[in-house]
Image (cartoon, helix red, strand yellow):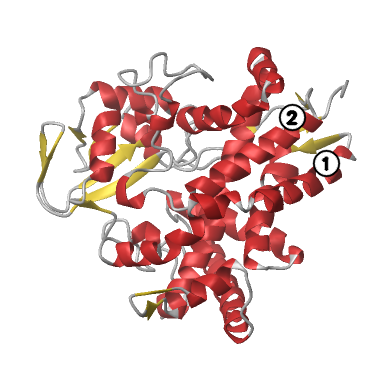
Amino acid sequence: MGDPLMRVLGRRAVPNPYPEYERIRARGEVSRHPLGLYLTADHAVSRAALCDPRFGVGPATQRGGIDWQVVSGDEGRLVHPLEESLLVLNPPEHTRLRRMASPLFAPYAVRELAPAIEGVVARILDEAERCERFDLVGDFARRVPIQVMCELFGIPHADHTTFVRWGTVLADTLDGIRTFGERRAVRGVLAEMTDFLGALLEKRRREPGDDLLSRLAAAERDGESLDDRTLLALTGTLLIAGFETTVNVIASAAVELMRSPDLRAMLLDDFGDVGEVVEETLRIEPPVQVLLRIAREPVTLGGVDLPADAMLAIAVGGANRDPAVFPEPHRFDLRRPNKRDHLAFSAGGHYCLGAGLARLEAELALRHLFSRMPRLEPAGEPRLRRTRNIRGHVSVPVRAGDRR
């Protein structure tokens, strides 16, 4: 029927959802869909809603195990990191957990990780350089954040491919689960993750080290520590959520640099601009396209009255291209002065805890990739993911090109 919401959130992913967001924005700052959902692609309204404590992330965004449960009692035994952590908690539980974990991701703590991240990137590029052609996603972008997180958690390298599989399966659940086969796949991943992370946590409690999990297990605030289930959910979230964001930003930025000679020349002339490339990529191609919020009480937003329990779909992909805030919004502009006003990492109390780490990983990955392969070029057509809410590339065939 040409419904823009159904085009964006329907069963099939839309290769280019941005015209649909413009159609949603044209209906007003906030509009009501016939199904009862409220929509916005307006930047100011989106930011206001994300920062307004009257909007929460549950219970409407919590599935409670219904979607993936296969065996009775699964939701009590298995931990789903995307459904039991910071992502789905409201204050005061969210505030308590965030305050305990946030010191580990403070700016000074993230800066100290730069040498370790550079070491990971260098090792991966050493392998890629030996190949005539390689997949920018599978052989590089996907490996960087996983290996970084594994080093931070003190996890052996042999487990990296397993984490990639876990991350891919669980990220796809953001689109919903439609078949029993998908349920079984998710249930299998959750069983593996719960067993693996549970055993790792038990080992860290016996033999604590300087890794991130040991520090989370020892973290206390006001004499209170995190229980094992919360720790497992938080650890899984850091592994999965950070993986998805960083992979997609690295790949999307590299694709843009390869198809824009002027942009690539600017970066090669001054790698100090790599942070600007990352920010504009986050604005123009946010990895998460839509965020859901629920009104915890009656709220007036954008001149529209929302009743309590009303669900609001915030089209981040549309808000980041709102022409009222970003002139020529569909143009990749390295010199755009307000590019950091994007909402790719959300805003307010649920602003992404690992945003600083994701930025640093993407910046270092792109800096080293193009300094070692300044003439990196496509070796085939890039392929986008077939998911609706997570936007990024599943494959980008490349070759190093002439290194002179």
* Residue bearing the label numbered 2: 370
Left or right side of 303 for 403: right
Work out which quarter of the rendered image holds the C terminus and state it.
top right
Instruction: Quadrant for residue 375, please give it.
Output: top right
Residue 79 seen anywhere in this rendered image of the structure = no
| Residue type indicated by callout 2 | Phe
Mark 1 crowdedness (10 Å alpha carbons): few <14, some 14-19, many ≥20: some
* Residue bearing the label numbered 1: 128
Residue 237 seen anywhere in this rendered image of the structure = yes
Q: Residue at x 43, y 73 (%)?
A: 230
Compared to residue 357, the image places residue 231 above or below, namely below
Instruction: Quadrant for residue 208, please give it.
Output: bottom right
Identify the mark at residue 154; answer none if there is no mark.
none
Q: Residue at x 44, y 49 (%)?
A: 175
Q: Position of residue 129 (x, y in %)?
A: 86, 38
Mark 2 crowdedness (10 Å alpha carbons): few <14, some 14-19, many ≥20: some
Judging from the image, what secondary structure is the residue with disc 1 in? helix
Q: Earlier in the sequence, mark 2 or mark 1?
A: 1
* Nearest to the observer: residue 177 or residue 223: 223
* Nearest to the observer: residue 255 or residue 279: 279
Work out which quarter of the rendered image holds the N terminus and state it.
top left
Alpha-carbon distance for marks 2 and 1? 13 Å
Judging from the image, what secondary structure is the residue with disc 2 in? helix
| Residue type indicated by callout 1 | Ala
Compared to residue 170, the image places residue 356 above or below, namely above
Q: Residue at x 70, y 53 (%)?
A: 116
Q: Position of residue 194 (x, y in %)?
A: 54, 74
Q: Position of residue 119 (x, y in %)?
A: 75, 50
Q: Outermost residue toward the bottom?
A: 206
Left or right side of 357 for 151: right
Q: Residue at x 40, y 64 (%)?
A: 85
